[in-house]
C-alpha cells in the first residue's frame, strides 16, 4: 500500500531508518540526517508485523550540499514491543570519506592528559564549540542505536541535547565516552534522559556497549 | 570546552575603547594546538616570544603544557610562516578561527541594518528573554504609535501580564482580523522570535510594500508574541526543554499543563495524558488554565471578525490544518490545503526549505484540545499551525544563525496566507495606494524610464 511521504507512519519509519543508518555509518566526522522521504509503501504481514519500504534522501550535516539516496526496509514486529525493529538499507553512492577528520579527533583525544568532560551540547542557543563537534556527531551516531532499539510505529525520536559527556580512559586502542543524552520523542513530546556507554575507533566504527533509560527530573 | 566565552573575552581584550576596528584583524587566524611532547612545548614557547604572537590560551607562555589546549592568534602577515614552521616541526594544528575580523563583526553590535536591527537597536537575530520582550513591546508601540497599540489580554498562573500587539491602519473601514500567537510551548524559542520579526517587518515595510499596504487597508493584525510567559521564563532560567505552563498540581509536587491540549476542542479525548507528570497533560478540564482562558475569551469575543488564526510552534517544518482529534476533514479542507501548499511553496522559494502540509491527525499525531482546532470549530475559517525549523538536527535548540533565514522564509508563507485571505474577502476593486506607496511607485517608474532611455 502506497503511503504519502508526509503520512505520520511513513515519517516515523523514515526517522527510525535514519537513526539506524547513523549508528551504522556515523562517526565523529559524519552527521547523517534525513533530507527528505521520497516514497513510502507499507505491507502488513500476517502474524509478523508491518513492513515499510522507503526511498530516502540523506544529507551529511557537515557537508550540506552532498546528498545520498538510500532505500530502506523497516519491519516493526507485531505484539512484542521488546524486539527492536528490523532495518535494512542500501546506499546509492558513496558517503564522503571522513578518515582524516576521524584520525585528527582520535589523536587529539588520545593525547589528552585529563579526560574530556563537557555538558549541554548544543547549549541553549544552539551553539556547539568547534572542538566539541566530533563529540556531538559521535553521540548522534550512538543515539541512532538507542533510537533503533526503542522505536515503535508510535514513536519518533530525535537527539535533543547531550546533557553530559565524560571520557573514560582505556588501555586498549578504543576511545570510550559515557554520555547522558536527552531524546525528544515527538508523539508523546517527552524528553527522555538516556545513559549510553560508547566505544569508538576510526577503523571499528561506533558501538554502544551499555545503555539505560534514566528517570525524568521529578522535582518539578 | 567553553570556547565561546573565552573567545568573546579575548575579542573583548582586542577592543581599545571606541576605536574604529575596521579590518584591523582582517585575515588574522587563531590556531588550536595540543602540544604532544615537552620539546614541542619548548618550541612553541620560543615561537610565541620570538614572533610576539598573541596568546589566547593559556595567558602566559610558561603555562603552555603538553596535552593541553593552546590557542594563539597569528597576524595575517605571519600565518604562512607560522604554518610552515609548525609543519617543519611536525606539530599538528587546527585553524580555530580563520578570520578574526569576521568573527568580531558578527559579535559586535552593528550600525543600524534594516534586517537585523530595528528601532533602538533591538536585535531580531538573537533570542530574547521575557524582560526584553516586554520592553520591546512597549518600545514598538511608542515608536509606531500611529499603527500599533498594546493590549492587555490576561494574567498567567504566576500572575504575569499577557499582552498582544494590534497593528491597525487608521481608517473608517470596519476591518477584519488576522490573529497570530507564538510561544504556546516554552522550549520553542524560534516561535516568539518569529512573532517579533513579523511585527518588525510589517512596521518597516507597510509604506513601501504594496502587498502589505493593500492588506492593511482591510485587515488588522493581532500578534501575541509569547502566550506561555511563565513557561518561557522557566525555559530560560531552569529547564531549556520545558514545554508546558507552570500551574501547580498535586500540592505542588507536579507542574504544568500542556496549553495546546487545554482548549475546548474535543478536550481530553485523544493524544493527551491525564497525568500531570506528562508533557501532554491536558489539565483538569477544558480551559482550566488562565492562559488558555485569556486567549479564548478574546478570540471568542472577536470571532465574527477573525478570518485567520495562526499559531506558531517548532520544530518539524509543517503547515498543519485541522483536525488533530479526528481524521474527518473540516468543511473547507480543500481550500485550506490549497492555501497551505501555496504558502509552503513560497517558503521553499527562499532557501529551499521543505515543509510538509496536511492535517495534524494524518501527518503528525493525534491530539485534542489544540488551540487551532478550537479556533476552526468556533468558525474561524483559516486556521493553521506552523511548525518551524528544523527537522531534528537541532530541534528546539535552533542555532542563532538560523533565526534570520527561518524568519525570512516563514514571513513569505504567512504573508501568502494573509494575502489570500485579503483577496478572498476583499476582492478586486481599485487598490488604494497610500501616498507613500504611490510616491514610491512613481519614482520607480521614472527611474525605469530613465534607465530604459
Image (spheres, coloured by chain):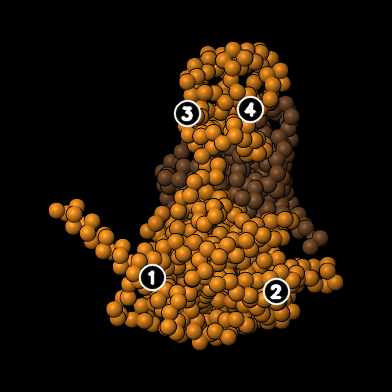
**Which residue of the protein is positioned furthest toward the left in this rendering?**
B453
Q: Dot 4 corresponds to which residue?
A: B56
Label disc, if present, on residue B213 of the rendered structure: 1
Which of A173/B174 is in front? B174
Proximity of marks 2 and 1: CB atoms separated by less than 8 Å: no
* Residue B100 location (% of width, % of height): 53, 32
Specify the subunit that label 2 lies on: B
Label 3: chain? B
Question: Tell me, what hue is chain A?
Answer: brown
- As drawn, the chain in orange is B
Q: Residue at x 67, y 44 (%)?
A: A208
Above or below residue B153? Residue B9 is above
* Left or right side of B377 for B410: left
Label 2 SS: strand
Labels 3 and 4 touching (C-beta < 8 A): no
Q: CA distance from mark 4 to mark 2?
A: 49 Å
Q: CA distance from mark 3 to mark 1?
A: 45 Å
Amino acid at each position: 500500500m502506497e503511503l504519502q511521504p508526509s503520512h505520520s507512519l511513513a515519517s516515523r519509519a523514515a526517522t527510525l531508518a535514519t537513526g539506524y543508518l547513523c549508528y551504522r555509518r556515523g562517526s565523529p566526522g559524519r552527521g547523517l540526517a534525513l533530507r527528505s522521504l521520497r516514497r513510502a509503501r507499507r505491507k502488513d504481514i500476517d502474524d509478523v508485523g508491518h513492513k515499510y519500504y522507503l526511498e530516502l534522501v540523506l544529507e551529511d550535516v557537515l557537508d550540506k550540499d552532498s546528498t545520498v539516496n538510500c532505500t530502506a526496509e523497516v519491519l516493526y514486529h507485531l505484539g512484542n514491543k521488546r524486539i527492536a525493529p528490523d532495518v535494512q538499507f542500501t546506499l546509492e553512492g558513496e558517503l564522503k570519506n571522513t578518515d582524516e577528520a576521524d584520525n585528527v579527533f582520535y589523536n587529539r583525544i588520545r593525547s589528552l592528559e585529563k579526560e574530556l568532560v563537557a555538558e549541554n551540547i548544543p547549549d541553549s542557543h544552539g551553539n556547539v564549540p568547534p572542538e566539541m563537534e566530533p563529540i556531538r556527531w559521535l553521540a548522534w551516531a550512538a543515539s541512532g542505536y538507542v533510537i533503533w532499539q526503542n522505536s515503535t510505529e508510535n514513536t519518533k525520536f530525535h537527539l535533543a541535547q547531550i546533557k553530559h559527556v565524560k571520557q573514560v580512559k582505556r588501555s586498549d586502542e578504543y576511545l570510550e565516552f559515557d554520555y547522558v543524552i536527552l531524546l525528544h520523542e515527538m508523539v508523546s513530546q517527552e524528553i527522555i534522559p538516556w545513559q549510553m556507554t560508547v566505544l569508538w575507533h576510526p577503523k571499528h566504527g561506533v558501538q554502544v556497549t551499555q545503555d539505560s533509560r534514566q528517570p525524568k527530573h521529578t522535582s518539578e | 570546552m567553553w570556547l565561546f566565552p573565552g573567545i568573546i573575552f579575548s575579542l573583548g581584550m582586542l577592543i581599545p575603547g571606541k576605536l574604529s576596528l575596521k579590518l584591523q584583524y582582517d585575515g588574522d587566524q587563531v590556531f588550536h594546538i595540543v602540544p604532544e611532547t615537552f620539546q614541542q612545548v619548548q618550541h612553541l614557547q620560543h615561537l610565541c616570544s620570538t614572533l610576539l604572537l598573541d596568546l589566547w590560551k593559556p595567558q602566559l607562555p610558561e603555562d603552555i603544557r603538553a596535552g593541553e589546549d593552546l590557542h594563539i592568534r597569528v597576524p595575517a602577515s605571519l600565518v604562512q610562516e607560522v604554518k610552515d614552521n609548525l609543519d617543519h616541526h611536525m606539530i599538528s594544528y587546527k585553524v580555530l578561527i580563520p578570520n578574526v575580523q569576521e568573527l568580531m563583526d558578527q559579535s559586535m553590535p552593528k550600525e543600524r541594518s534594516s534586517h537585523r536591527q530595528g528601532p533602538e537597536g533591538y536585535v531580531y537575530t538573537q533570542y530574547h528573554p521575557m524582560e526584553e520582550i516586554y520592553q520591546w513591546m512597549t518600545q514598538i508601540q511608542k515608536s509606531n504609535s500611529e499603527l500599533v497599540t498594546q493590549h492587555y489580554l490576561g494574567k498567567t498562573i504566576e500572575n504575569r501580564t499577557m499582552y498582544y500587539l494590534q497593528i491597525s491602519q487608521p481608517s473608517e473601514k470596519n476591518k477584519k482580523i488576522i490573529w497570530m500567537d507564538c510561544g504556546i510551548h516554552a522550549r520553542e524559542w524560534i516561535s516568539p522570535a518569529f512573532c517579533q520579526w513579523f511585527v518588525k517587518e510589517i512596521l518597516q515595510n507597510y509604506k513601501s510594500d504594496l502587498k502589505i499596504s493593500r492588506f492593511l487597508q482591510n485587515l488588522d493584525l493581532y500578534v501575541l508574541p509569547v502566550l506561555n510567559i511563565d513557561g518561557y521564563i522557566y525555559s530560560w532560567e531552569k529547564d531549556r526543554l520545558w514545554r508546558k505552563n507552570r500551574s501547580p498540581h498535586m500540592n505542588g509536587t507536579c507542574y504544568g499543563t500542556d496549553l495546546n491540549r487545554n482548549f475546548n476542542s474535543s478536550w481530553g479525548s485523544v493524544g493527551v495524558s491525564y497525568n500531570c507528570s506528562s508533557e501532554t497533560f491536558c489539565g483538569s478540564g477544558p480551559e482550566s488554565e488562565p492562559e488558555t482562558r485569556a486567549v479564548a475569551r478574546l478570540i471568542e469575543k472577536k470571532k465574527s471578525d477573525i478570518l485567520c488564526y495562526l499559531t506558531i510552534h517548532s520544530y518539524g517544518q509543517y503547515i498543519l490544518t485541522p483536525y488533530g482529534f479526528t481524521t474527518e476533514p473540516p468543511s473547507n479542507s480543500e481550500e485550506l490545503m490549497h492555501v497551505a501548499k501555496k504558502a509552503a511553496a513560497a517558503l521553499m522559494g527562499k532557501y529551499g526549505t521543505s515543509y510538509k502540509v496536511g492535517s495534524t491527525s494524518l501527518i503528525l499525531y493525534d491530539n485534542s484540545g489544540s488551540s487551532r482546532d478550537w479556533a476552526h470549530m468556533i468558525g474561524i475559517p483559516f486556521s493553521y499551525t506552523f511548525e518551524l525549523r528544523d527537522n531534528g538536527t537541532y530541534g528546539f535548540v535552533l542555532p542563532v544563525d538560523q533565526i534570520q533565514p527561518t524568519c525570512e522564509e516563514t514571513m513569505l508563507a504567512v504573508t501568502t496566507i494573509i494575502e489570500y485571505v485579503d483577496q478572498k474577502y476583499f476582492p478586486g476593486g481599485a487598490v488604494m495606494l497610500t501616498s507613500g506607496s504611490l510616491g514610491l511607485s512613481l519614482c520607480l517608474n521614472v527611474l525605469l524610464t530613465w534607465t530604459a532611455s
